[in-house]
């Protein structure tokens, strides 16, 4: 954030604290890396303004342009507004509403983060990381999940989560003995995903009906 603003981190610390205290900004700790927090806009209208309106403000200043701008902004709306909101809905559901049996335990906290892949020299984003109570030396990682609002999910998503789980196990930060793999989708799952869930009790598929208590 400081780099984007071309300021020192110390220069923006106070404004960020004020925005947090006012409830306009949320600070989320990375579940897999220390001292790598991310920030998200708490007020939906402000988020919508920055994602959709501000980039094309010159267009919107002309009367009658709203429909044209809205039609051209659908992809940005899905990726920058709906997608992040759906991810947060999934995290809230996992923390407050999911059956502990589905997660292999009661969550202590739910977050998200980046898992480093040294061999591939890349990082893998985890949308939902469900962490249990640490009874021993390591806290149990109850589940990791991927959330896709506008995609039908399949085996590629499940295999990606399996790979990420193996990387987390190698890192040694969490106990991954019973870590579940959860796919959250706003549009559903293909037949291969259903077959994988039937064959592997660690794989769980969560649709909108389940998220909103109709499943």
Image (cartoon, helix red, strand yellow):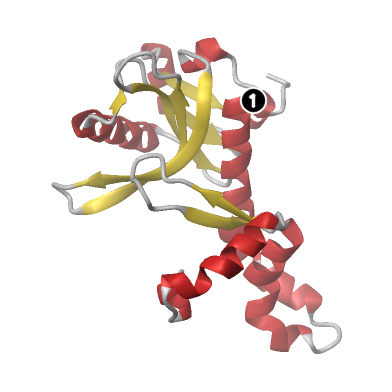
Rendering quarter of residue 172: top left
Nearest the viewer among 84 and 133 is 133
> From the viewer's perspective, is residue 66 above or below residue 35?
below
Outermost residue, right side? 63
Q: Residue at coordinates 29% horizontally, 50% vertically from top-left?
A: 123
Query: Element under label 1?
Result: helix
Rendering quarter of residue 203: top left
Q: Residue at coordinates 71% horizontally, 89% vertically from top-left?
A: 58
Rendering quarter of residue 79: bottom right
Outermost residue, left side? 119
Q: In the image, residue 183 lies at what x, y percent?
A: 48, 31
Task: Name the residue beneath numbered marker 1.
Answer: 96
Position of 130 with respect to 33 (left or right) is right
Q: In the image, residue 11 lies at what x, y percent?
A: 49, 75
Q: In the image, residue 60 lies at what x, y percent?
A: 76, 83
Q: In the image, residue 55 lies at what x, y percent?
A: 62, 79
Q: Mark 1: few, some, or many residues within 10 Å (few <14, many ≥20)?
A: few
Nearest the viewer among 153 and 164 is 164
Nearest the viewer among 21 and 153 is 21
Q: Residue at coordinates 44% horizontally, 76% vertically from top-left?
A: 4
Q: Say if residue 126 shows up in the picture.
A: no
Position of 123 with respect to 196 (left or right) is left
């Amino acid at each position: 954030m400081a780099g984007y603003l071309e300021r020192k981190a110390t220069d923006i610390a106070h404004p960020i604290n004020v925005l947090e205290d006012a409830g306009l900004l949320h600070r989320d700790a990375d579940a897999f890396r220390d001292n790598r927090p991310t920030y998200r806009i708490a007020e939906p209208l402000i988020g919508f303004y920055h994602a959709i309106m501000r980039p094309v403000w010159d267009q919107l200043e002309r009367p009658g342009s709203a429909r044209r701008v809205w039609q051209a902004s659908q992809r940005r709306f899905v990726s920058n507004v709906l997608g992040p909101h759906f991810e947060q809905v999934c995290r809230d559901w996992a923390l407050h509403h999911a059956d502990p049996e589905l997660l292999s335990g009661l969550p202590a906290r739910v977050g998200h983060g980046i898992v480093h892949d040294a061999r591939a020299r890349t990082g893998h984003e985890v949308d939902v990381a469900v962490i249990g109570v640490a009874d021993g030396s390591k806290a149990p990682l109850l589940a990791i999940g991927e959330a896709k609002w506008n995609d039908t999910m399949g085996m590629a998503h499940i295999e990606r989560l399996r790979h990420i789980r193996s990387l987390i196990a190698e890192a040694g930060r969490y106990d991954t003995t019973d870590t579940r793999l959860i796919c959250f989708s706003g549009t559903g799952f293909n037949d291969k995903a259903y077959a994988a869930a039937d064959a592997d009790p660690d794989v769980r598929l969560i649709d909108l009906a389940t998220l909103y208590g109709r499943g």
